[in-house]
Structure formats: C-alpha cells, structure tokens
Image: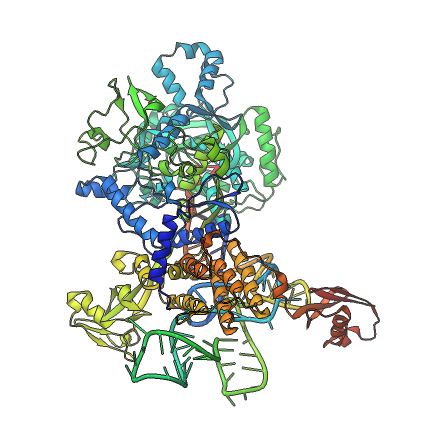
Amino acid sequence: MEYNHRAIEQKWQQYWKDNKVYKAEINPDKEKFYVLDMFPYPSGAGLHVGHPLGYIASDIFARYKRHQGFNVLHPMGYDAYGLPAEQYAIQTGQHPEITTRQNIARYRSQLDKIGFCFDWDREIKTCDPEYYKWTQWAFIKMFNSYFDTDANAARPIADLIAHFEKEGSKGVKAACGKELHFTADEWRAMDEKQKSDTLMNYRIAYLGNTMVNWCPKLGTVLANDEVSEGLSIRGGYPVEQKLMYQWCLRVSAYAQRLLDGLETIDWTDSLKETQRNWIGRSEGAEMIFKIADSDVELEIFTTRADTVFGVTFMVLAPESKYVDMITTPSQRAAVDEYVNATRHKTERERMIDKKVSGVFTGAYAINPLTGEKIPVWVSDYVLAGYGTGAIMAVPAHDSRDYAFARHFNLPIIPLIEGADVSEQSFDAKSGKMINSSNGELNLNGLEVKEAIALTKKFIEEKGIGKVKVNYRLRDAIFSRQRYWGEPFPVYYKNGIPMMLDVEKLPLLLPEVDKYLPTEEGEPPLGRAKNWHTEDGWELEKCTMPGFAGSSAYYLRYMDPRNNDALVSPEANNYWRNVDLYVGGTEHATGHLIYSRFWNKFLHDLGIVCEEEPFKKLINQGMIQGRSNFVYRIKDTNTFVSNGLKDQYDVTPIHVDVNIVSNDRLDLDKFRAWRPEFADAEFILEDGQYVCGYAVEKMSKSMFNVVNPDDIVERYGADTLRLYEMFLGPVEQSKPWDTNGIDGVNRFLKKLWNLFYKADTFLPDDSEPTADNLKSLHKLIQKVTWDIEHFSYNTSISAFMICVNELTAQKCRSRAVLTQLVVLLAPFAPHISEELWHALGNDTTVNDASWPVFNEEYVKENEVTMAVSFNGKARYNITVAADASREEVEKAALEADGAARWIDGKTIRKVIVVPGKIVNIVVG
RNA sequence: GCGCACGUGGCGUAAUUGGUAGCCGCGUCAGACUUAGGAUCUGAUACCUUACGGUGUGGGGGUUCGAGUCCCUUCGUGCGCACCA
C-alpha cells in the first residue's frame, strides 16, 4: 500500500467534520486555552501560500495543547468590511456583499483543504448584522462614557452630568479636548445644544472638529496608522490635512494604561517598542510665557526645562490660536500670507520641503526667568497637534531651533560647558550647565538631568508652569465617508447627535444605487432612501472604519450566537482572553492598539474580566515570492539558459513559477504557456534550461504566486504544513521556494514505509529495544521543547532523524510507533490520524494524550566535564556517564596538562559535581 | 536623527542557551538499480592544501580554561518612529 495523500486527507477531513471533532464548549472541569489567528480580509485573489503560515503555526499549537488536556478554543472568521470590495463595487456596480460572500466561500474551501482544527460553528463575519450589532453597541457605550483621570478608567457620562448639575466644571477630573470652566448655574442655563457640545468635550466617542488625514482620491478620512509619509497605505494616494467635524474615539485617554499594560504581556520586544514609540510618552513641563504689553499668555511644552535661560525666541505653529491673538498690525499682512501658504500645503509637501521658513508676529514674550523680551515667530516646523502648538526656542541645544536661528539671524546662547555651537547645536542631554542663573534659581555647574529636575520644581513653586506628561498618541478618527462599513447608530435631532435605542440595533446598512459620493459631496449613504428614523430625524451618513469590526472579535468568538450580549459573563469568565495570538506585525500601531483600547474600555464597564486581550503574541514573517526568469535573446524567439546568458544580449522575462521545477524550465509547458512562445527555441546547458530567480513580492504580475491548493493536490496538506514550518522560524520573513518540498514529502513516505511494506502492516506487539526507546524519547523531549518555543522547523528535523533511526533499527514496536504518531499529529494530522487508526485505535488521534518524556531512556554513556584547579577551569575530560567519583578524579589527574599545573603542589581536595565540573584544590 | 532586530557553507537553516560550529533539508558530486528518470536507495559535500596541516560564524578589540553565543567598537542589512520641542 502506497502513501496516498488524497484519499487519506479527504477521508479524515470528512470524519472530523461529521464527528464535530473540533467543536469547543465551556467545560469548567478543564483548563481553557485560547489560540487565535488574526482573521483575514477575504480578498479577491484568494489565499496564496504565504497566508497559511501563521495559521499552520497556531494550528500546531492548538492541537498540541489539546493533547495536553486543555480545552482549546481555536476559531476563525472574516474581517469582511474593507476598501477593495467597495472599489470593485464602484467599478462594476456589484454589491460588495456579493463579492465578499464569494471571496469568503473561496477562502473557506482553501482553508478546509489544509486540515485546520478550527471550530467553524463559531465563525463570524464583521459584515453580519448579528455581529456588527455589537460593534454599534460598543460605540453607544463609548458615547455614554467619559474618562475619569482620577479613577484612570471610563465612567458613565451620567455621573459627569450629575457633577455639572451640582458644581459645574469645578473639580472635574476628566480627559477632554480642552479645559472648560463653567459654574453649575451656567450649566443649567445652557440649552440642549450647548449641553451636547459641552459633553462632546468629554465623551469617549465624540464628535469633534479635528485635523484629519483627508485623502481626496479615496474620498475619505484616514486614521494615523492608515497613512505613512503623507500617503495612504491603501493605494498610496496623497493625504491632506483638513479640519473636519468627525466622530473620534478618545484613545489618548488610555495612553498611560496602554503603555503600562505592555509590561504585563508576552509580546516581542520589538513590537512593544513599536507601540511605545507610537504612544510616544514624554515627560516635561508646561510653562507660561507672558506676551509683553498684552494679557495673552503663551503656554508651551518642553522636555528641556533646564534650557530656559537660553531661550532667544518663541515659535508658534501656523494653526495656533495664539497667532491671531498676538500678531501686531504692522506684521498682520505678512503673517496672514505665511499662514495661508502653509494651509494649502499637504502634510507631505510640508515634510518634503525642509527649507527653513517663518515670519515674525511683531509681538514679544517675556522670559519668566530672565525677564528679557524675546520675539515670537510663526513657523511650520512647529506642529499644531503636539503639546500646545507653541514652543520656546533654544537654538544652542536644539537642531531645529538652531537652523531657524541661523536662517533669521537670531541670537544663540550656549548653556552647557564646552559645547561648541558655532557650527551646529549641542542636542545631547549631558554636560554641566553655564549661563543659567538669575539670583533666585542657579543651575550653573549642575548636570543636565539635575537641572531639569530643579527647574521643574522651581517653576511649579513660582506658578510659572507645571510638570506635564505628553503623548504622541492621538485620538482615533472614527468616521469614514464610505459605503462598505458599519453604519453609526446615530441620528441628528435638530442638529444634536443622539444614539439609537439599543433595542433598535442593529441599524442595517441600507441599499444605494451607486457606491460613490453624492453630487453634493455627501458620503454614499446620502443616496440611501428613507435614511432617517421613524420620527424623520436624519441618520448619520458616515460609516465606521475597518478597525471597528476587528477590535472586539476575539470576544465575540467566546459566545458568537448570543443575541443578548456581546459575550455572556459565563463565557467571558471561562475563556477570559487570548492565550496565544498569531498574526503579522503590520497591525502593530493599528488593530493591536485599538483592540487593547477597546478591551480596556469594556473592562472598565465590567463587561470583560481581563485588562489585556492578548497574553502572548507571535508575529509570523511574511512570505515573499521567488520569481523565475527566462532570457530571450533580443529580437529573436530564442531563449538562453541562465548559465550562458552573459554571452548574449538578452531581455529577462518573468516566467510562471508553476511551469518551473528546481529552476528547470518545462519546455513543453512553456511553449503552451503563451501563444507567442509556441515556437520558442532554446539554448540549453547540460540538456536543461535553467531559469534565473529573484525575491520579489508575491503577486500575479510577477507570475510567482504559488497557490496552496496546487501544493495540496500534488503533495498533500500534511506535506504543505510540514514544509511551511520547515522553511525556517515562524517569525522570520522568507521567500517561498518550492524547491526542497520533496525532502519533507520523502519523510512522510519513509514514515509510511515504517508501517507498511507492500500490503503488509508491519507493527506488532514486540518489545521496544533500548535503541527504539532512545530514539523515541529524544524526539519526545525535542518536540515538546520546540513546540513550547515555537521552533517548529527544528522539530521537523528531529522527526526526520527519528524516522531514519527507527527505520534502520527495523522498529516494529506498536508501543513506540503509537507514540510517534501522536507526536506528529499536530504537524501532520491526516497521516497521523490514518496511522493511529491502523494501529487499532478507534477514537480520533486528537484525543490521545501527549507522550511523557522519560530521561532514563536517553542517558548518554559518555559525558564531558570541565576540569578546574582552585576554581579555575583548565581543560575538558570525557568519562563514562556512570563513572564513579574515583574514576572521574583519576581521569582528571591523568588528563594531559594536569601534571604541569600541579607541578610540585599537593592535592588537598577533589570536588566532583556530576555531569558538570571537576574542581581540584591544590596548594 | 532616535529606537528595535539581525549578520553562520552554493541555498534555507541548526547549535539543548558559555562547552567538539555547520544538525536536518535543498542543491552538487560519486555509486547502485533501471529502456528511461524531474523515481528510489547508498555514500561524500565549510574553505585552503596532493598530503601533512592550516583557516574559519561581517571586520577589529576585550572578558573567559573555553565565545557563533557575553562586553566594547566598527561596517552592513531589515523593521519601527520621526521638524514630537
């Protein structure tokens, strides 16, 4: 009987499905383990061979945990809302739901062939009303909450209203857009609209006039993580800054908790670092600079409070509210011109244009420590969105201020001993302070760090400023001027935004005639008929962004069909959070921040029990394409093999990797590939046509897409699974190279031949030999350790060695082979299930318990030890593993070199630490 | 500019965490069986050298009896953040 992967895989996939082998249910008697993959966006191109990499890795872990007796939750679903389906709808008029449904069906059939242990009964799709009902529900919860900075947690907005009723804004400790001051009487006197506007300043989901990333080409607003270097991540179109009235989520309120939480979770350092950078905490001080002959006070943020004595000018961002307030009449025209010019530049243009520019406002500020008058300028190198949009400039110790000072000929005062500021600024935070004294405060002679601390203390005491922590993390912009997304559960009553009743959820996505914006420039939902409440109030026309649906999906898997709650307390208390999350790093500053925020918010509300959603995270690497080339001699239809191409003038042409094997071109398939190659001629080397290769992105246009279905058809899912893991560490990016797959396929055949010779089933009840047990237990130890450490590639090497050894030993022992099959089951489940049943078991191999390692069987007969004299090691000796203490001493003293060391000294004591070291005390 | 990874044969990688560098696989070479081989099996394969022997984990230095592994420095690659005060 030959190893027939097609028959075996089909048979057991059907068996698993029929018997619901992978169904997960709450079982209080068993410990849970939650293994999650980042769910895919179902694109039209289907899965390529890179997509399943992470799924295979997590599948192995899920199966392993199950063998260990855990109750494993391992679900899968689809992140179904997204731009590509909408773009396709705009072009073709086809409803994105139809496209999405087709793509999902394709994904499902591809996934099914690989033999994953997903519990498909828990499948979710973010575009399902049953699902997005809970996305809308969470939004309503955020709208009805504010962030209490004392409690460091979200609280009901009703509590805040009660506070306003009683005491106005006095004593309010809440994350907000801007500081507001009003009394209880003033609050009560406000009309409904004014109250609504006031509360917007505090709500966690709020409408705000914010600078947004507007992408004219996509016709929508984008979040910060959807923009890179001034271009949209999707499509690469230019992005402008634009002030718009948009729904936002007050993610920034959670900045510190998002930062602190990183300490409690098991993610890679680089990913945590990326999130820390993105959150961008900086400790500094906010200081007040009074404007001369005016009531205006400039508030600035600095991390270098120590450099106040070196401030020679101030700079405002062009968008700063202070600009209008302080510009003098004589400078008004120049300032207006400058501000207008910068407003029309996109962020990208501002970034590319590194030329120093700016304009003087005509106003002077007073340095609070020196009393000196210093000019206030406007320049676009100061960002409106960070800190207060105003800075104190210290040209001697900040390179940007330095460039500005040089360009406009402003004074530069060095503050650090020995700093040469004639050519460039001295930015390092080290050295001894000079020129920094005013009688009250003397920093001279202090180290920078001491000076910073002392200045902070001083300005707080004097009321000039206060210690302040700033974060780079901005609130998430939550509106998209798009069709294919979750509708907001929002209507406008006389212009006041109101939430729908939760009972009326979900608010279904309406039908539209076209997926484009309206002629009036409204979002596509502006085309929907009857887009209003029963009372006739207008509904919100924007939809939610992509990250809305993916922010809490891991919670929904715990209780996916619950119509009364996102997740029941029972389900949440049992499954808690994700123990192992596998996915790409590209979500580091998007999904992985938003999810953590969303989870923390729900935690504050008492809806989820864990503060962090994902305990351990593994980032699988990207699989790049490996393209093949043929070389056509110019102006001919003759192709020359790679090794000979330098002798001709050739044009490289991408050739479909699927008609190339081990870089050898199949000539007949090539001629049949395209009509223009039908009569192609070849110049061969050694009778073969060798193709060139290059590593590129996997894409259709490079003809380097390898489809997992083809691999499964030819080699089987087990071979695909093993090979993907064998390529290298899961975390590492690497090109897909089908060369080499024969190696793992051969391994499975060898394994098969251990069980079958022709039609004879070989295993019998013979006693395992010592060699059999040694081979097996080395494998148990290695594979267990490797799975725990996600080092699957080395496990597969270990399997190969073990099977080779057992073959050489002619092992027939059913006991040994049974354990071998269980060890392999997480990696190659189909062949393992087949052999498991052949060995006489009638339940699924998935229920078999994990083999227990026994050290006795793998004991080495020799052991190497370091010999030391007086604690200083000198050389190594090798002795029998069961050597007595005397034998070890003897070997140590007889070893080469010992005589030289001892040389007349007396041996006082010999210490033997078994297996490790021999210490000989001499003197 | 700041931060984080990483650098090992022709290639993908390994080295049980400071203890014989190169496991396993691909490729290559040789052989066996074959009408045939893009099948199967066996053996060899870091580099230099006919050999003896020598050199080797990007380069340089250090710690250590011992370094791919730890420290310093330098070069190179990848990723993240970036006029963030």
Name the one closer to the observer, A288 or A425.
A288
Q: In this rendering, would A883 be left or right of A820?
A: right
Q: In this rendering, would A797 be left or right of A899?
A: left
Name the one closer to the observer, A68 or A215.
A68
Tell me where residue B11 sits by quadrant.
bottom left
Tell me where residue A331 sits by quadrant.
top left
Position of the C terminus of chain A, as image quadrant, is: bottom right
Image height check: is A180 above or below A32? above
The picture places residue B15, in percent across and down from the top left corner, at: 55, 64
> How many labels were placed on the picture?
0
Tell me where residue A306 sits by quadrant.
top right
Is residue A405 visible in this depiction of the protein? Answer: no
Q: Residue at coordinates 36% horizontally, 42% vertically from top-left?
A: A123
Image height check: is A9 above or below A693? above
Position of the N terminus of chain A, as image quadrant, is: bottom left
The picture places residue A757, in percent across and down from the top left corner, at: 42, 72
Q: Residue at coordinates 37% horizontally, 35% vertically from top-left?
A: A561
The picture places residue A530, in percent across and down from the top left corner, at: 21, 24
Name the one closer to the observer, A148 or A359.
A148
Q: How is the image coloured?
A: rainbow
Is residue A543 visible in this depiction of the protein? Answer: yes
